[in-house]
Image (cartoon, grey):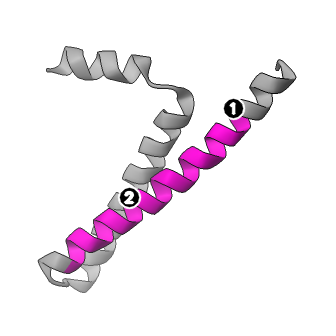
Amino acid sequence: MPRRIRSLWSHATTPVKVGLFFGTLGGLLALLGWFRERGDLLGLLIALLVSFATWGVVSWAIAQAIYEVEKDEGV
């Protein structure tokens, strides 16, 4: 299994890696907030989903835009 994960990671583009990194960071921050407030389990799941999705998608979109601009300019 780790070989397959390494293979997927090596084939992923840089914007995807950026999105996964910041999505994971957003999820960890949501988890930290949940431990601080000790909410219910449904609140944790919603917080993880929303934070992972928003941080991941927004950072991926920014990285993808930068990637496309650099590709068009030939940098």
Residue annotated with mark 1: 67
Residue drawn at (42%, 52%) of the image: 23
| Magenta segment, prevailing SS (helix, strand or loop) | helix
Residue drawn at (44%, 43%) of the image: 21
Instruction: Quarter of the image for the C terminus: give it.
Output: top right
Give the answer, above or below, for where 16 lies relative to 2: below
Q: How many marks?
A: 2
Inspect this view and state whether residue 35 appears.
no
Give the answer, above or below, for where 20 lies relative to 41: above
Image quarter of residue 42: bottom left
Q: Range of the magenta residues?
A: 43-67
Tag 1: Cα neighbours inside 10 Å, few (<14), some, or many (≥20)? some
Left or right of residue 74, residue 63 in this image:
left
Q: Position of residue 57 (x, y in %)?
A: 50, 52
Left or right of residue 16, residue 49 in this image:
left
User: In the image, is residue 50 part of the stretch drawn in magenta?
Assistant: yes
Inspect this view and state whether residue 43 appears.
yes
Give the answer, above or below, for where 14 lies relative to 10: below
Residue drawn at (56%, 35%) of the image: 15
Residue annotated with mark 2: 52
Q: Position of residue 68 (x, y in %)?
A: 72, 32
Q: Position of residue 32 (x, y in %)?
A: 31, 69
